[in-house]
Amino acid sequence: MNILSFTGRTPSEALKKAKMEIGDEGMLIETKEIRKKSLGQDGLYEIIIGVEGENLQSSYKKPKKPLSQQRSVKKESEEILLDISNAAQQIAKVSNVTNDPIAEYMSPPKYSQPVSSEPKELKEIRSEINKLTDKVKIIQNMFWDEKAPNTQVQIPSEFAEIYRLAHKSGMNKEHLDELMQITLELMPFKMRENSTTVKRYFQTILRKMVPIRRESTPIVGAKKVMMLVGPTGVGKTTSIAKLAARYSFLMQKKYKVGLVVLDTYRIGAVEQLMQYARMMKLGIETVVDPPEFTSALNSLRYCDYILIDTMGSSPYDKGKIEKIYECLEANTTEYEVEVVLVMPSSIKYEDLKVTYDNFSSLGIDTLMFTKLDETLGFGNIFSLAFDTKKPISYFSVGQEVPEDLVCASSDFLIECLLNGFNRSKV
Ligand SMILES: Nc1nc2c(ncn2[C@@H]2O[C@H](COP(=O)(O)OP(=O)(O)OP(=O)(O)O)[C@@H](O)[C@H]2O)c(=O)[nH]1
Ligand SMILES: [Mg+2]
């Protein structure tokens, strides 16, 4: 077999040259990045093609010096992987590339080799097909070089899949670029060889980047006081009910839970929580003016957990946010109130950021995201936590009380981000 080398500014340019010179008969053995693309310089890629015996097209006039004589080719590379025609055809199918630079040089597929009925040969064919599938993925990614997004860092083709997934998830672009850079810098070279290991490594990096507050239970004698704040209709009251049920019935230890309602503007809001309190037989206090906040907390002194529901306020409604602030300021008890900002996962990162900024005067401690069941992308959640460095404490994944609540974990979020929300994995 003759081993030939072709170079180009992109792998597909090199492949095109090979196609012009040797037609369909060549077998793609290896693709290499020889020089990275930089500001003032094009990238340089080399593809290595194997051609059986004298089987070269007449258009191939100048026989190149076999590469095997120039330098050694890895033994494993000798295993023939792909016929160029077949490759190009499959790429077009898989990647749906229009204006495929190879397509114009393509001839109909040739299945010249009759399949032997010998079991041993069948086995070999199956093994070839497996290798082929792997290589199709590599070649599919070659087109990445031509479609790759305009980013600060050059994203290699092996990263195409994770880039697409993260981009589609709604992650902020600057964060994505930053993460790509980190991943590129840290990833051991060996792991870049296939997209599965690249994805696994990227997953690990993402997990490390997202701040999470693990659920902790109150130590004996102490109390946990949590206040849920956030825009209207995001699921604060429903989440208070879920948390109340969790702490009072669903954990190993049954805690005493008390509720406080700050949302006294609307009769319906008080009634909603009153109903849950009645069902779960929990103490409940209402607060109209800030000085009553301390007395409400004092009345629930016997509780391990005090959960405070607040009026939903538009992020632009400074008046309502101010009222909540006054209550927090008026707290003269020894209890520290953990302020949880509740936001729906169904809004884009920029809107989450505006919401966060508007509520930040309350001193946000943790983030809770609701309605995970109503969205497809989770990169916005990642980006907000990554940007604000505020840990996520809980997720709400549906309307059902109490079951649709998930304690935050980076594994869960990153799984949702890369593979979508799956109720069976809750
Ligand atoms: N699909 C889905 N719906 C949810 C989720 N959490 C809450 N909801 C629904 O969202 C609606 C509003 O929920 P509430 O708990 O009343 O929201 P709120 O933030 O207290 O609303 P205001 O008090 O008006 O600000 C209800 O119909 C809930 O059932 C969730 O995780 N997924
Ligand atoms: Mg409410």
Image (spheres, grey):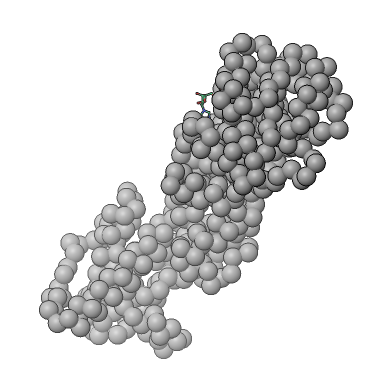
Asked where in the image residue 396 lies, by quadrant, the reply is top right
Q: Is residue 333 above or below residue 53?
A: above
Q: Which quarter of the figure is the N terminus placed in?
A: bottom left
Quick one: 67 or 171, which is closer to the camera? 171
**Which residue is depicted at the point 12% across and 75% down?**
114
How many numbered markers are drawn? 0
Quarter holding residue 259: top right
Would residue 165 be found to the left or right of residue 381 on screen?
Answer: left
- Residue nearer the viewer, 215 or 112: 215
Identify the residue at horizontal 50%, vertical 59% (top origin). 199
Which percent across, then down, holds residue 365?
A: 73, 37
- Any part of residue 92 in sight: yes
Residue at point 25%, 85% (across, down): 53
Image location (x, y in percent) of residue 405: 55, 38
Left or right of 183 on screen, residue 388: right
Q: Is residue 158 above or below residue 254?
A: below
At horizontal 26% and vertical 56% (from top left) the residue drawn is 104
Q: Quadrant of residue 328?
A: top right
Q: Residue furthest bottom?
A: 69
Q: Position of residue 148 (x, y in %)?
A: 48, 52
The answer to whether residue 386 shows anywhere in this view is: no
Is 160 left or right of 230, judged from the image as shown? left
With 65 as the anchor, is 213 left or right in this view? right
Looking at the picture, how far across and down is residue 65, in whole percent? 38, 84
